[in-house]
Structure formats: structure tokens, C-alpha cells
Image (cartoon, rainbow, N blue to C red):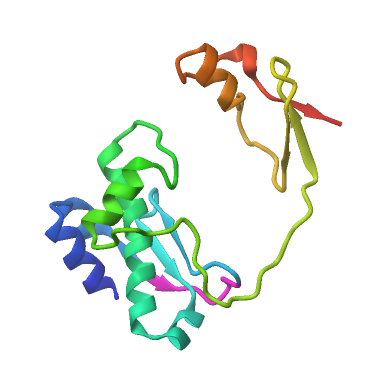
Amino acid sequence: MEETARALLRGMGCVSLAGEVRVRWYSRLRTTAGQAYFAKTLVRLNPKLMQFGMEEVDKTLRHELAHLVARFRAGSRRIEPHGPEWRQACRDLGLADEKRCHDLPLPRTRQRARHRYHCPHCRRDYDRVRPFRRAVACLECCRAHAHGRYDERFRLVKVR
């Protein structure tokens, strides 16, 4: 799998990324088909993918590589995980109409959101399973009033 990933990345001109990328089977994945970690240049794949055939394994590998390619191309600029940069990388990897989530019959689990945040400007609440680890602002307010840039006026406040 790693050699396939490296060949795909070299074919796209991402030579330095191709030299560093690692692909691993990760048995702790339950509902997720794969994960990509740009900082570690690592792609993790769910071993249960094998029961759906090599075509599904290849598609998931390309999906996760697209995350790495999108971040690689963006440099230090922040991008959305499944935004336009990712969609372009998917097309470049041969996935024309890739969806954000898979539709494989892997068991789904839902975790209860235990953390609630509130925007002081638009008064919208955001429920989260995990707490934010850094200052986060309301995206809608930042887009509407700060040209899409972080603005302290719209910083989300944790609700007790």
C-alpha cells in the first residue's frame, strides 16, 4: 500500500511528500474507513476494508492521500478538511465525485455532545463531543463581519 501511495504522490509532483508518507493498517478504527495525519505524513486504514475488496481499499487510500496533498499544497494556510482544496486533490487522484463520508456498512456509534459553546454575537450554540483546545470563533460571524478571518469579538464561550 505504501508503494502505491508513493507512486500516486510522485505522479502528482509531490515528491517530498511521497518520500515521507507511511500507510498503516490500524485495527482500532471501528466506524472510520481511514484517517490522514499530515503532521506525521501517515495514513491509517481500517482492516475491515479488505472485506469490501481491493477497489474499496484503493478508493479509501486515495481519499486519505487527498487530505495530505491538499494540506501539502496549502502550505501554512489553514484549509477545511473537505473543502475545495481537498476536492481538487481528489480529482487529481482520480476520484471525480468523492463524498465526504463513506457509505460502507461499518457499525456507527454516536457519542453524546458534552460540551456547549455560545457565540456572543449571533447567539448560536455549538455542541461538541470534545472541547476545543484553542480559541475558536463563530465561522458565520467571522465570514460576515471580518472577511473570514478570526476575530476575538466572535470568540466562542463555553457554557457551563
Q: Residue furthest right?
A: 160
Residue at 60% across, 30% down: 134
* 131 up-or-down from 156: above or below: below
Give the percent coordinates (x, y) of residue 137.
60, 24
Residue 25 belongs to magenta span: yes
The quarter of the picture where residue 42 lies is bottom left
Give the percent coordinates (x, y) of residue 33.
49, 69
Residue 80 belongs to magenta span: no
Which range of residues does the magenta coloring cover? 24-30
* 127 up-or-down from 53: above or below: above
Position of the C terminus by quadrant: top right
Position of the N terminus by quadrant: bottom left
* 98 up-or-down from 152: above or below: below
Residue at 45% across, 15% down: 147
- In the displayed structure image, the side of residue 69 where residue 7 appears, left or right: left
Residue at 51% across, 82% down: 48
Main SS of the magenta segment?
A: loop
- In the displayed structure image, the side of residue 10 where residue 24 appears, left or right: right
Give the percent coordinates (x, y) of residue 18.
21, 59
Give the percent coordinates (x, y) of residue 155.
65, 20
Residue at 70% across, 40% down: 131
